[in-house]
Amino acid sequence: AGWAGVYFAYRLLESGHVVNASDICLFEKSPRFGGRTFSHHVIPDVAEGDTYVTELGAYRFSPDMHLPGDLILNKLKLETECWDPGCPDAAEALDMPAFNYHAPLQKLVDVYTENRGYGSAIEAMIMQLQENGARIFLGHKLVGLQKGGRRDGGEGNFTLTIETGGGDRRAVSSTKLFLNLPRVSLRDVKGARELMGETVFSAFNCTRMDLPESFAKKNIVPQEALVKSYAYYEDAWWISKLGITDGSFPKEEFIPIVTKNGVPISLHYNDGPVKCKTGEDEEGKPIWTGRFVPYAECKGFLQTFYSFTNVSWYDRFQKDPREPLVEVRKEHGGVEAEALSQLHDAMMETHSELFRKRNISTDSIPPPSVMVISVWRRDHIGSTAPTKVYYRKGMLASACGVEGLTEKSYAQMLLTPFGTDAGVFLANNDYRATEAEQMYGDWAEESLLMSERALATMGVEKPGWLNATYYQEEVVKQMM
């Protein structure tokens, strides 16, 4: 269960549609909730004990995305701050072709303004579900589906075959079923294709990556994985020495440069959890803030890479394609220590002129001690990056091989893949079909909209905290 699965369960409870929370069961194959939202707590130095939250997957949102924006801000009332310290227009902050949101990007923070993690919104919903008695099962994987079954002495619509972490299997019957599964995972569920039928399966199985003309001009070619990397510096030199608190290097987002020693880099200076000293308390202990303070004493993580090209220098450290998290530590020695040294040399090479202007020797900057890497694969193995349908204008039907297919019919077909009366709903960010020059539905938005459409089908009304115009356009009209 990622964003959509947890949200669907939360809304059933919050709306009063389900009176008994114990009637809600959440199954998740991994040891954690969140899916492609993965807020990872890391302690760079055990002796020092500082904890930082690094974002391995989705990690920011624009309030223009009323889902999850209104949920986070109006319902859960979680604290946020601008992801970019200057709070610019979202499209300007990312400088990306085809990005269609404008309200300043936000990140979730704690009372000390330190990064709390995008996943903390999911955790807040899970906590309320648990407190009310919902049943939650981690390490339980859906491996089979078939029609029929019995539940509490009554007829069930479907029987699920669930495999536990130990390899044992059990049958579970359900009258209503919400599948928050990416394309690769559902494709592997025994019986799913037969239940869909060939037309729906063709739409479901369709993936397309027609690049916008603006991408093609920049020679952006997606490879087999989407990779993100953060490096921990005891001296956050980009802030403390150079006074840089925002922006990217190189300027073109997602287009890394390769340094002299062969290390590809794609930096975002304001992306990565940091702690900057703002003073001392009465006992002389430092007071830290998560805000970027130019030329202050700072420590923390710098995003050194985020792209789907030139990824091999980073993804070579991934041992299990099903596990996106990789930690590279100096203390491990060998190739890990060597990689951190190489990465540092790349950082110093690309910033040498800025250091020279401030009369600072790059030799005075200690190398990073930890690198946190996330690898989201596109090769249908393990934890995959999103596999959406970006198609050239007017070409969706031919792209997917389904006659007459439109964005609306695609959305309706995938929401109820086993038929409109089956009582089974599907939601994931994979299932967004959009013209290549557009970019909507990222960072959990589309999966949450699919949740709301499923809820509306069940008769659950719009929540009072959700923007009415947005709901009308993105939920009601999409179901007509």
Image (cartoon, rainbow, N blue to C red):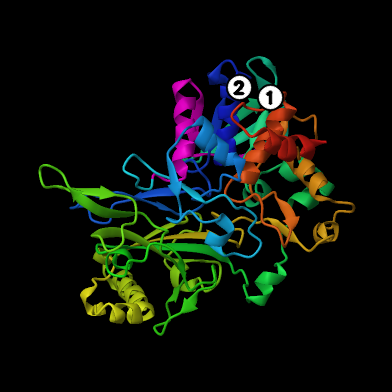
Image height check: is 472 above or below 313? above
The residue under label 1 is which amino acid type? Glu
Report the residue at 56% width, 67% height from top.
308
On residue 461, the disc is 1
For the question of whether residue 169 can be seen, the reply is no
Considering every residue shown, the one lying at the far bottom of the view is 260
Q: Which of marks 2 and 1 is nearer the N terminus?
A: 2
Quadrant containing the N terminus in the rendered view: top right
Q: Name the residue under label 2.
A: 15
Crowding near the residue tagged with mark 2, few <14, some 14–19, many ≥20 C-alpha atoms within 10 Å = some
Q: Position of residue 372 (x, y in %)?
A: 38, 60
**Residue 399 vertical position relative to residue 71 in the rendered view, above or below:** below
Position of residue 145 relative to residue 432, above or below, is: above
Q: Are there few (<14), some (14-19), or many (20+) residues within 10 Å of tag 1?
A: few
The CA span between labels 2 and 1 is: 8 Å
Picture residue at 48% right of the left edge, 20% below the top:
132
State the image coordinates of residue 53 (x, y, percent, origin top left). Answer: 37, 49
> Percent from the top left, x then y, of residue 398?
85, 60
**Residue drawn 60% across and 22% down?**
15
Would you say residue 275 is visible in this rendering? yes
Vertical side of 256 occupied by 80: above or below: above
The residue closer to the viewer here, 114 or 416, is: 114
Q: In which quarter of the image is residue 274?
A: bottom left
Pick whichever, 218 or 328, lies toward us: 218
297 on left or right of 301: left
Residue 134 forms part of the magenta stretch: yes
337 in magenta = no
Residue kind at label 2, given as amino acid type:
Ser
Q: What stretch is highlighted in magenta?
A: 116-144
